Every structure is written in C-alpha cells, then in structure tokens.
Amino acid sequence: MTALFPDVAGPRLVLGPGVRRMPWAAARQVAGEAAAPLPAETRRLGDAVGHALAAPLTALTDLPAFDTSAMDGWAVAGPGPWALLSDGISVGHVPEPLVTGAARRIATGAPVPAGTSAVLRLEDGFAAGQVLHSAVDVAAGRDIRPRGQECVTGTMLVDAGTTVTSALLGLAAAAGHDDLLVHRKPSVQVLVTGDELLQSGLPGAGRVRDALGPLLVPWLAGAGATLQGKVALPDDPAALRARLRDCQADVIITTGSTSVGPTDLLHRLLPEEGARFLVDSVAVRPGHPMLLAQLPAGPGGQRRWLVGLPGNPLAAIGGLVTLALPLLRGLGGHRAPEPLRLPAATPIQGHPADVRLIPATVTGGAVRPLRFDGPAMLRGMALADLLAVITPGGAPEGTLVETIPWNA
C-alpha cells in the first residue's frame, strides 16, 4: 500500500501547511486494498442479507423449470374453436397432455400440458356451451413461458463480490439454493473519545452531546459491518491504550483524537503500540486529519485495523466515506460500485487545493449543494441524498460531479 505514497508509513506530529496530505482518491484506494476479504462461511438464505457472495451464484435448475402459463385463460391445442374440457389446470400439479382441438382452463404460473400450442387469455376468449371461441388470432407459443427462458442449469446468475439483497435471496431460492457461500462481515468496535461529550441531556457548561455515537451504529450496519460495542472514553491515555490492546474486533473506529492538540492521543499511542500508519491526513475538506493504521494482531491472533475519525461530525462523515467504507468493503469481500456522476445544478465552490465533500440533494437528475456544510454541522447532512465530491477549483454548472450515496 505504501508504494502509492511511501512517506505516510510513520506518524506526523506536526500537521501544518508544509505537510503533504495524501490525495483523496489515493487514500480511498489504500483503504480499499488494505485487507483481503475475511474467510467465507455458509449461511442459510435468511441469514445472508448484507454479506458479500464468496462464490458466483449459479442456477441449480432451469428457470422456469417447466413450461408455464404467463396469463390466466385457457391452454389450447391446435386451431380453434376448441372443445372445452371441464377440468382445469391448477398450479402445483402435472397435467395430462392436451389433445388437438381441446382446451382447458389454466392459471398464471401453472404448468402447460404437453400438446399445448398457446394460451388464450381470459379476456380474449368466450365459451358457447362446451365450445371455446377466440376473439383474436392466437399465434403459436403465445403467453407460454418456455422452460429455461430466464436461464438453464449451470448458468452463472450473479458474480462473487455481489452484496446479498432481498431480491438476490429471491433469485437464489428460485434457482434452487437453500444456502449461500458468503464472506464473514467485519466486526467493528467504536471508541467515542472526549472529556467534553455528554451521552444524554442538554449541552452546556463546555459540554456537548455525542452526535457521532448515534450516527455510527446504523451507518455501520448499512456498510456491512457487525457492531461489537460502542464505548465512551475520556481523554485518558491509559484507558485508550487498554482498549487498543484488548479489542478483538477486526476494525476499531475512533472519534476525535486524530489531530495534534493536547488531548489528541493517537499519533503518540499508535506507534508505541506497534501500529503502522497507512494513511495519515488526507487532502479533503472537511476531515483532513483522518487516519488509517494497521494494528498488531489482536488477543485472538487476528489482523486488526484502526480508522481514526475527526471529532467534528461532518468531518467524521468525510472520514467514514474516505477510509472506513472502502476498508469495510474490502474486508467483507464486497465489490466497489461504479462511481455515480451527475451534473451540477448550480456552480459549486471548491477548495483551492483539496477535495470538498458537500452534502447535496438530487433534483431533476442534477446535484444541488445544501447549506450548513461546516465541519461541525450535521443539519445539511440530515437532509442530504448524497455527498458531492468537488475537485479543487470547484464545479461549474453542468459539470459531471462524482457522488457518494448517503442512506444510513
């Protein structure tokens, strides 16, 4: 990883104007490639949502598995009119063959009898006694879903790395699967640091509410992680050091303590604990004092990583999408989606040198930035559909802008 930006492997104790921050795209790449996917495990369909497929999903049967009716109506054999048989064809049964000149009622999804030339829709036919007539020409094969129309046995339906969704579960079940081979979800422990943080009640007297703790829990679930606890810590080196040593989660996410103030402890503690910096400060606003480090093996011998988020809420969100999201995708075996680029609805101001991440909505297919985009603000983010990635210099109206969905 360090070949991309070799001088980031050690701590930086001074983050001033002369420090070379890692480019935003490079930081995301480093985070996404920092770890191999976690081991694969077999899970029942109902327990696989949110995991990534560890192997391609293939069809264990033809779909459909037999010729079926696409409409309610009559199965007919040969040209009409037809002798209307009294017994209908229902789903879940194998019907007797149909002789030429005969017709039987059939329901949508029911198996089509051998000898059927077409299905006559209910609205297109009428019976006169025991004779069925058609008001339209009935072409051969009409409204019959032939066996294997969607796929045949052995077809690869979905590639490895695809995130299991409810729709994918339905496809897997239809294709004959009871279980799926998926990667284990990464476990995460959240350490919320700061003497000034309140966990309840009104802020005041120098104390502020912890906004990141409540935000992180649903976001981590949506990002494909399993939460292994959220702990509030004071600005105490001993308490933080103990958590770093004892944590058995794959990833530790800290809030605050990433800069160089008197209570910012990570730059000192991480090297002392044998950690290796992969990313230390990124050329992005807000959130540039974010970091990613590889930790020594945990108590159980597993590899571990730490993502350090700035303490300001919107800056922390910048750290989540820049470092935490690519890292969690990599660990979980998820394939990264193609970037979605949309035109700017209005000119969007940029930073002279850094990427800007701006809360935005999508109106009429175009990106419109929201107000309240300061590092400590969440008001704009609460209304945002996504984050707009604004490259240095800004984006004129109509320019295609990369976007990052925000749906936690």
Image (cartoon, rainbow, N blue to C red):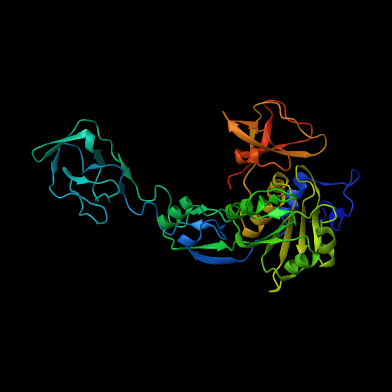
Q: Residue furthest bottom?
A: 300
Which of the 4 image quadrants contains residue 177? bottom left
Instruction: Name which residue lies at 79% across and 31% down.
Output: 393
Which of the 4 image quadrants contains residue 243? bottom right
Q: Left of 55 or right of it: where is 352?
A: right
Residue 13: % across, % down: 89, 55
Q: Residue furthest right?
A: 18
Q: Left of 320 or right of it: where is 112?
A: left
Seen in the picture, residue 229 relative to 312 is either above or below; the reply is below
Q: Left of 97 or right of it: where is 59?
A: right
Instruction: Name which residue lies at 28% across and 39% down.
Output: 140
Residue 30: % across, % down: 75, 53
Instruction: Name which residue lies at 27% across and 56% down.
Output: 92
Camera-side residue: 28 or 63? 28
Residue 48: % across, % down: 51, 60
Seen in the picture, residue 216 relative to 381 is either above or below; the reply is below
Camera-side residue: 15 or 95? 15
Camera-side residue: 255 or 50? 255
